[in-house]
Amino acid sequence: MATTGKRMDYTSHLILQRTARERVKEGITVMTKGEGVRVFDQDGKSYLDLVSGVTRPVHVGYGRKEIAQAVYDQICRLPYFTPMQFSNIPAMELAEVLAEITPGRINNFTFVCDGSEAVEAAIKLAKHYHHFKGDKKRYKVISRRGAYHGVTGGALSVLGTVLPMRQIMDPVVPGTVFVESPYCFRCPLHLTYPDCDIACAKDIERIIEFEDPGQISAFIGEPIQQAFGALAPPQEYWDIVRSMCDTYGILLIIDEVICGFGRTGKWFGVEHFDIQPDIITMAKGISSGYVPLGGVGCTDEVIEPVEIFLHIHTYGNHPVSCAAALKNIEIIKRENLIINAYEMGIYFLEGLKTLESHPTVGEARGKGLWTALDLTTDKKNRAPFPLDRIMSIINRAKKKGLIIKTMGHALEFAPPLIIQKGEIDEAVKIIDECITEEERDMGL
């Protein structure tokens, strides 16, 4: 049996995901407790968690007994029943709540276990829509280089980053077409905004025409991308993409797995761009990570032609997970955490902007409480920062009691939405110290 006071090492029977065996041999920190915005390891050391459990789901913070009680009550009442041909009350109630807060005309929902499954279901739903309309040739999906959409079969096929995760599994589901991302700090087209005229978006039409519009089912994209580090596109970008989808009869899937439920200072990230998705995916903040849950939402226009959605997971529409999500959303509303994410996000970004005085900090950016520092070894040509150096900064921060992470060539931050100014000040101070120490070691 595992005990506190012991790090995980190679003698453990547990397989860690996306963790090198060399790291396991060195010893893995075991987290044993969480309170508010802090977590505690096997030795009782406290850490300020600036990435909400690293994969960013813990929106309402740690230790919410209300959610635990909701889970307990539902388990006692009805722990499980199938998602096909029967329904359950928490799933129905959660769909009603989501219909009120999701963007525009998103009114219909089905629930799965996580974000990858949500993407998988969304791609299937788009193909069902075209199939039942008699448009059976549409099988291709447009994704973007630098996109992250999960690691199940269909989701993996639209993965445009962390490439070994996809390449090891090749051949994956065929039919994905990749276009460029709106990464203005390091433009893949070597242009400069706004003189570029949003070429990365407008070039998508050329790809659509080349691939045959009659074969394209959907365009999938995160409203704000994670792979480069909390990267929001130019304001005009999504208007252009939405218009192209309308022109060619392509469904627009907006992946809200990270952005949803207040992370960016609005209920959903797409609200920053004032467009209407056809389908959205969600996970993470829907339950604040207390139990596994993901979901797919769509407009009436998408679901209306679908005579039967031929998709099933044993734990779909799970009553216990849906009960947890209902309580989680209740807390987000009651404590005005969307507003707090917006206000604390401004304050946090202001603090990060002061770090642009460092020779290695190329850009501080973010929306709400999802921010990043894009690092570089040369501000003039924006040369990428070495990954080993980024990891060194992260390790320095951990030693000082701060958990942060990397995405691309950036340091990424996504604290629980309950964070306050004092904790932000503490975090910025430690980040500043760690970057200063790393620059000193680099001779800068």
Image: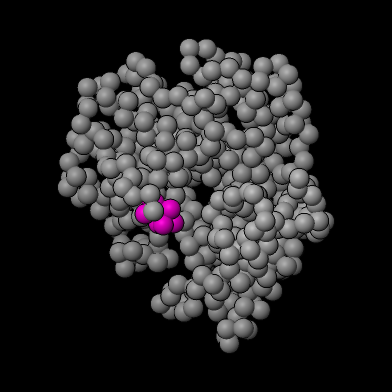
Q: Is residue 401 left or right of residue 235?
A: right
Query: Percent x, y for residue 272?
Result: 49, 45
How many numbered circles does the render carry?
A: 0
Q: Which residues are magenta?
A: 160-167
Residue 424 seen in the figure: no
Write down the quadrant of residue 432 in the picture: bottom right
What type of secondary structure mainly makes up the magenta span?
A: helix
Residue toward you, 160 or 203? 160
Residue at left 71%, top 62%?
Answer: 402
**What residue do we see at 72% from left, 37% from top?**
335
Q: Which colour scheme appears in the figure? A: one colour
Residue 292 drawn at (x, y percent): 60, 35
Q: Position of residue 417 (x, y in %)?
A: 67, 46
**Most extreme residue toward the top, as rendered?**
85
Does residue 163 show up magenta in the picture?
yes
Left or right, 25 with reference to 423: left
Describe residue 427's horizontal placement relative to residue 91 as left or right: right
- 103 in relation to 376, above or below: above
Who's the residue at 46% across and 79% down the image? 378
Residue lying furthest bottom: 443
The quarter of the picture where residue 121 lies is top left
Residue 85 appears in the picture as rendered: yes
What residue is shown at x 45% (from left), y 72% (from top)?
A: 384
Q: In the figure, 173 relative to 386: above or below?
A: above
Quarter that holds the N terminus: top right
In the picture, residue 135 is in which quadrant? top left
Location of the C terminus by quadrant is bottom right
Q: Is residue 240 above or below residue 327?
A: below
Relative image position of residue 77 (x, y in whole percent): 71, 16
